[in-house]
Image (cartoon, grey):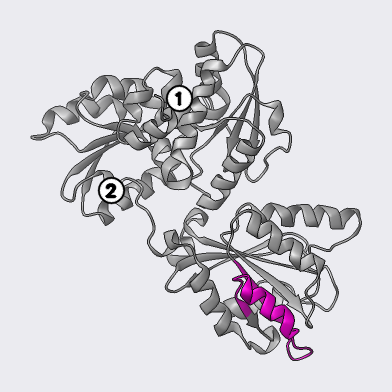
Amino acid sequence: MTARQKTPKGFRLHIGLFGRRNVGKSSLLNAMTRQDVSIVSDTAGTTTDPVEKPMELLPIGPVLFIDTAGIDDAGALGEMRVERTRGVFDRTDVGVIVAAEGQWGPFEIGILDQLQQRQIPAIAVFNKIDLAEPPAEIIAELTDAGVPVVRSAAVEARGIGDLREALIAQAPEEFINAPAILGDLIPPGELAILVVPIDLEAPKGRLILPQVQSIRDVLDCDSYCMIVKERELRDALGRLKRPPAIVVTDSQAFLKVAADTPPDIPMTSFSILFARCKGDLAEFVRGAGAIDKLKSGDRVLIAEACSHHPIGEDIGRVKIPRWLGQYVGGELNFDTVQGHDFPENLGDYSLVVHCGGCMWNRREMLTRTLRARAAGVPITNYGVAIAFSLGIFARALSPFPAALEAAAGPDA
């Protein structure tokens, strides 16, 4: 596996391929990647679960193609396939709607509506033009609606170059000029101290993804960093000739790091940095205010982007429930979901507390935020919730005054 293929999914442009069964989605993916990634057959419904293929698409960079099952699948198994396909909408950055033999009807219009409701750029691909050309009036309607149209014959690799150009044109600006994680908080040539606790859940022999990505981001912005454990922070600060531009800690060590960091030095956590990078920090800050309204017996949803086996004092299953319970002064009821699972009954919860989403793209985090907002349920982030419950809310958000102001509202 090359270094490019090892780029985390969360930093890839997610391109979803949608359409009816047997329109050539898998053939299109194979032609784009120049590999037999998906099984191709004349039998409708060959693709059952979404198939993911990472590749490099210049000048965008790393992308992830997601080949989905036909949205018109039937039967009990078909319903399960369709449900999984619908879940792909939530993490799609650019949607490719594939139609064949000139077809463009309710199924395709429904897919386009789903994408447009989520403000996801869409591309219409009329495949199998060797068998039938798309109707001119349909192409005109799509063009007038601002939807690029590509004509292709995937089995002959015709139209693949046009599809690449359309994908590049539709890619969100953030993928061409990716936002910084914390580099914009540190002037070039200045120092960031990153506090990395080594506990039972720390992976043996390596750092976790947010820590690694933060180190790389500091270097990309022509600054430098010092890595310490929480017990060594005070000594490290004492050895410096001038103070660091910022101290960033794992949220679990907030209290000790806050106590050891002078108040004139900005301090925050990796989780809060990723709340800004991957989601809507102001929304998470507003959501944390709901912790004040929690009462004994309320249900709280803990949502984790990645699946892992909890060990000892797990942050999502043990520590956050403990801190929230102590703050509320009563027993709360907690449910936990992992990966792409997210319940439909969000209205049953008084609060959603989400991890930083370092493994995800920003689209999926924003989609979850919108779903919570639509259900009238406040949503916040691990680091933001921990800072609030431990009484260091303003301190942990000091590098982000705009988020605090936006969350407070115009009358604050």
Residue positioned most to the left: 241
Count all numbered tags in the image, as a single digit.
Answer: 2
Across and down, in percent, residue 337 comes to: 65, 36
Three-letter amino acid code at the position of disc 2: Asp
Left of 406 or right of it: where is 363? right
User: Hey, which quadrant is residue 347 in on the image?
Assistant: top right
Q: Residue at x 56, y 60 (%)?
A: 93
Left of 389 or right of it: where is 234? left
Sequence-wise first label, 1 or 2? 2
| Pick the front one: 397 or 240 | 397
Three-letter amino acid code at the position of disc 1: Ile
Across and down, in percent, residue 92 comes to: 60, 58
| Pick the front one: 144 or 26 | 144
Question: Would you name the residue on which mark 2 appears?
Answer: 184
129 in magenta = yes
Residue positioned most to the right: 75
Across and down, in percent, residue 384 comes to: 44, 29
Spatial CA span between label 1 and label 2: 24 Å
Q: Which mark is residue 386?
A: 1
